[in-house]
Amino acid sequence: MNSPVYLDNAATTPLDERVFDAMLPYLRGARGNPSSLHGAGADAREAIEAARGHVAAMVGASPEEIILTSGGTEADNLALFGLARSAPPDKCHAVVSKVEHAAVREAAKRLEADGFEITWLGVDEYGMVDAREFSASLRDDTAFAAVMWANNEVGTIQPTMELAGICAERSIPFHSDAVQAAGRVGMDVGESLVSTLALSAHKVYGPTGAGALYVREGVEVSPILFGGGQENGLRSGTENVAAIVGFGEAARLAREEMAERAAHEGELRDLIIAGATEVPGVRLNGHPERRLSNNVHLTVDGVEAESLVLMLDALGYAVGKGSACSSSGHKASPVLEAMGQSEAEAFSALRVSTGKENTLEEVEGFLGAFAGCIERLRELSPIQAS
Ligand code: PLP
């Protein structure tokens, strides 16, 4: 059963009805394998190529630079392992920020376990990477660097253009995880010199299980999946046509409606920030200005986030815990730690993320419920509050 008011859009967004309608024919009747020679195969191929064009347009890429994947996680893995494996043997060092999503962080840890040297780049109290420190961490044997476009927990937007420019000057491939930023932040790979960019459909009102890796023309990436050689040999496996069509439509709509969506969710975000931080012992995390239009990340002193999430859920409000490690593990994520927060603070963190379908009434209702739940939880657990 879903909470009637959904304020967890950073975790996943609801499927847009228009996206669903675009996918339906490919779920229902259309059966062709896009690699088949017959008409049904050609229809499926045509649908995939149209979708690829929309995904490319969302980030200012050309369609040939888009490798369709099963989602953001696979795109990040393909970038990290693909860049590492295609690097010359004397380049076995990488720079990776400490605030990356697990899809990048865990892939980098795997490279580290396999003998790669990783410089884990720190951030300031707002979760921002320092461009000078970044530059100083690059070496002659650096195979690639990875810093996400915007953080999924605290919403901080990194100086991606600057970081990518620094890498481009030194001919070091630069990967950016843009899963949260795409469709919210204007993004043009013509201007920002990123080498690879990870994207995911279900953060932009598309289906889960579809994503893409942008690979700039001329950048070498080795495959991590082997088989039929689809996607230019970079991603073998029969394409998920319906999901790809959904991603294409979601990307087309995201591009068309970005300004309107960002203004709407940003207005609701600001109302939540203003209202929530009026409650004593509640403060905002992440950068005050350079933050995603849908992200509110709060520390609620004296309250365990899990209890707050469950209590709000019981009242009909779906929000996220602010410290995501794994889907079930009770462990603080490294993001808040990298920002200098204690584990106790991390367990009191809540993420509220707005979306295009939220309303002012929902936000007002949420703020009332939020204040009430905090009061009740602090009453129930006065020791924690002291
Ligand atoms: N990167 C970031 C920043 C994310 O927020 C997520 C999803 O939460 C991912 C990668 C993984 O994407 P997917 O769920 O499509 O595998």
Image (spheres, grey):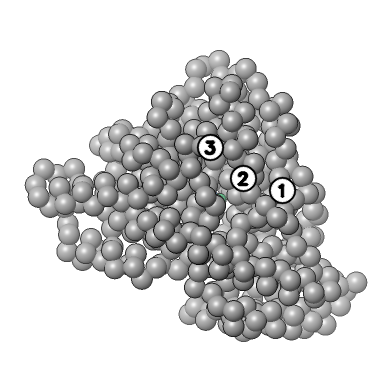
Q: Residue at x 74, y 46 (%)?
A: 338
Q: Between residue 202 and residue 250, name the one nearer to us.
A: 250
* Residue denoted by label 2: 100
For residue 151, above or below residue 204: above
Tell me, yes or no, whether the two marked residues, 2 and 1, touch with CB atoms within 8 Å: no
* Residue denoted by label 3: 192
In this rendering, position of residue 316 left or right of residue 73 = right
Depth check, mark 2 against mark 1: the one in front is 1
Depth check, mark 1 against mark 3: the one in front is 3
Q: Is mark 2 within 8 Å of ligand 1?
A: yes
For residue 162, above or below residue 7: above
Q: Look at label 3 and name its amino acid.
A: Ser
* Residue denoted by label 1: 127
Q: Between residue 378 and residue 217, name the one nearer to us.
A: 217
In this rendering, position of residue 46 left or right of residue 212 = left
* Number of residues whose C-alpha sits closer than 10 Å to that of mark 3, classed few (under 14), some (14–19) or many (20 or more): some
Upstream in the sequence, badge 2 or badge 3?
2
For residue 310, above or below residue 165: below
Real-space CA distance between mark 2 and mark 1, rounded to the nearest whole angstrom: 10 Å
